[in-house]
Image (spheres, helix red, strand yellow):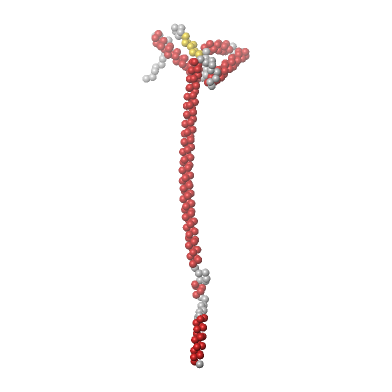
Amino acid sequence: MGRGKIVIRRIDNTTSRQVTFSKRRNGLLKKAKELSILCDAEVGVVIFSSTGKLYDFASSSMNKVIERYGKLKEEIDQPGNPMAELKYWQREAAILRQQLQQLRENHRQLMGEELSGLSIKDLRNLENQMEISLRGVRTKKDQVLTEEIQELNRKGSLLHQENLELHKKENLFKQENVELFKKVYETRDANNINGAQTSLLPNGPNIDEDAQVPVHLQLSQPRHQNCETSSRTTNLGLQLR
């Protein structure tokens, strides 16, 4: 069940009233501190208990907050006064110059300069601030490096995929080249075989053409046989005589 609504009125029970005061007071001071840090506001809170005890909080200095409040209150009560407006902006400029000077001093102290006037407590606070800053820087650096590593891994995966695709294309080109070489050599071998068969055929006229041309045959004897025949005839003639 949800918490019921609390009626805003004076608590009659003294103990309950004191407990509620303590809780609400701590919550109010905590909210005032958070407001001054988150919004860079100058906050001052003054609380008096029913017994007359004082509780206060100021983001810078309670005297400065009260002084500033009094001056601004006077200016608000007298609107349209150019001198009052001029003084207001002069005070604002002075406050800003003072804040700038303080920030410069803090920066120099963080850089390790002008530390002679600091106490042990101030040095410890400065050391804690530097440790917190270093942890933040290291955390941010680790985050940036992790993101860069993830990006490089992603790019590496993409390049690996592209290399695989290129290897596949290269293998396809090699297979196509092998097939083209096979076709070229087969065509060349076929041409060589056809050329060899053509060279075996006679260079003269065809057989059909030679069949139509008349053929003249002539018998002849060797020359030494003729000589032998004439000598034999002479010898026979001499014998007959």
- Residue found at x 49% / y 13%: 57
Q: Which picture quadrant has residue 27?
A: top left
How many marks overall?
Answer: 0
Q: Quadrant of the N terminus?
A: top left
Q: Position of residue 156 (x, y in %)?
A: 47, 38
Q: Is residue 208 above or below residue 89?
A: below
Q: In the figure, is residue 64 to the left or right of 53?
A: right
Q: Nearer the viewer, residue 48 or 98?
A: 98
Q: Is residue 241 above or below residue 51?
A: below
Q: In the figure, is residue 82 to the left or right of 130?
A: right
Q: Position of residue 225 (x, y in %)?
A: 50, 82
Q: Residue furthest bottom?
A: 241
Q: Position of residue 99 (x, y in %)?
A: 56, 17
Q: Nearer the viewer, residue 118 or 198?
A: 118
Q: Is residue 169 above or below residue 82?
A: below
- Residue found at x 47% / y 49%: 174
Q: Is residue 162 above or below residue 51?
A: below
Residue 66 visible: no
Q: Nearer the viewer, residue 16 or 143?
A: 143
- Residue found at x 50% / y 13%: 58
Residue 97 visible: yes
Q: Residue furthest right?
A: 82
Q: Nearer the viewer, residue 46 or 145?
A: 145
Q: Residue furthest top?
A: 51
